[in-house]
Image (spheres, rainbow, N blue to C red):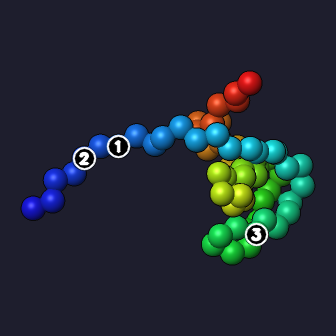
Amino acid sequence: MVSKKKFIKKPVVVEAYQVTEEMDIKTLEGTMKASPGDWIVTGVHGEKYPVKPDIFEKTYKLID
């Protein structure tokens, strides 16, 4: 039997900007639509993906 274990995500620094108009974002999964207010995150390998504002607020914290 397989036993489940708990994990926590490693802290990773990403860059992000908030969009003010609808736009298409090319992601690893294909083209996705970003809506006004969404954040576009650039991951550690240069991949881009849109994140809804409420999820972004819960997941990311501004660093200096």
Side of 62 where 37 appears, left or right: right
Secondary structure under the numbered disc 3 in the rendered image: strand
- Asked if labels 2 and 1 touch by Cβ distance under 8 angstroms, the answer is yes
Query: Label 2 sits on what residue type?
Result: Lys
Residue 39 location, x and y as percent? Answer: 75, 48
How far apart are the two marked residues, 3 and 2, measured between alpha carbons? 34 Å
Query: Label 1 sits on what residue type?
Result: Phe
Residue sitting at 58 percent across and 41 percent down? 12
Give the mark nearest the N terminus, 1 or 3: 1
Q: Residue furthest bottom?
A: 30
Q: Let me know if residue 49 appears in the view.
A: no
Residue sitting at 90 percent across and 55 percent down? 21
Viewer-closest of 63 and 57: 63
Q: Which residue is mark 2?
A: 5
Secondary structure under the numbered disc 2 in the rendered image: loop
Q: Residue furthest left?
A: 1
Viewer-closest of 35 and 56: 56
Query: Label 3 sits on what residue type?
Result: Lys
The disc at residue 26 is 3
Viewer-closest of 28 and 51: 28
Q: Which residue is mark 1?
A: 7
Residue 32 location, x and y as percent? Answer: 73, 68
Bin the neighbour count of mark 3 within 10 Å (Cα to Cα): few under 14, some 14-19, many 20 and up: some
